[in-house]
Image (cartoon, helix red, strand yellow):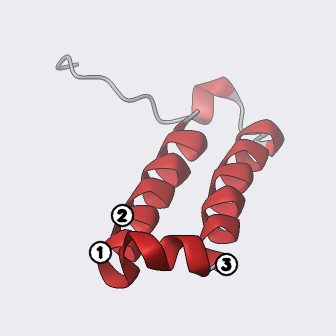
Amino acid sequence: MPYFLVTLIAAVLFWGSSAVLYGYAGLLEVPWIDCVVCWLIAMGAMLGLLDDTPPERQCRVSLRPA
């Protein structure tokens, strides 16, 4: 799950910065931006599926103090 969330955030940041750089019309004209966004999301999903780290070795994110 952390892989997917990180790559999803990276994809949104990449898409947003591309929209600022190229403008909305540029996003429609430049096809590689969509490819990069899709690849970022797909790689996060693949890393999440292929992760074989045992649960006791994974870092757990918690907002409560230990």
Front in this rendered view, residue 4 or 61:
4
Name the amino acid, label 2: Gly
* In-front residue for pair 44/28: 28
Q: Amino acid at mark 3?
A: Trp
Point out the image quarter for the N terminus: top right
Seen in the picture, residue 38 relative to 57 is either above or below; the reply is below
Circle 2 is placed at which residue position? Answer: 16
Report the residue marked by disc 1: 20
The disc, 1 or 3, on the residue closer to the chain's N-terminal end is: 1
Q: Is residue 2 left or right of residue 55?
A: left
Q: Nearer the viewer, residue 9 or 58?
A: 9
Residue 57's x, y, as percent? Answer: 60, 35
Q: CA distance from mark 1 to mark 2?
A: 6 Å
The residue most toward the left is 65
Q: Residue at x 43, y 55 (%)?
A: 12
In the image, residue 62 sits, relative to residue 39, either above or below, namely above
x and y, in percent, of residue 16 in the image: 36, 63
Secondary structure category for the residue under label 1: helix
Question: Please, is residue 7 above or below residue 56 in the view?
Answer: below
* Amino acid at dot 1: Val
Q: What number is the disc on residue 28?
A: none
What's the residue at 50%, 72% (across, down)? 27
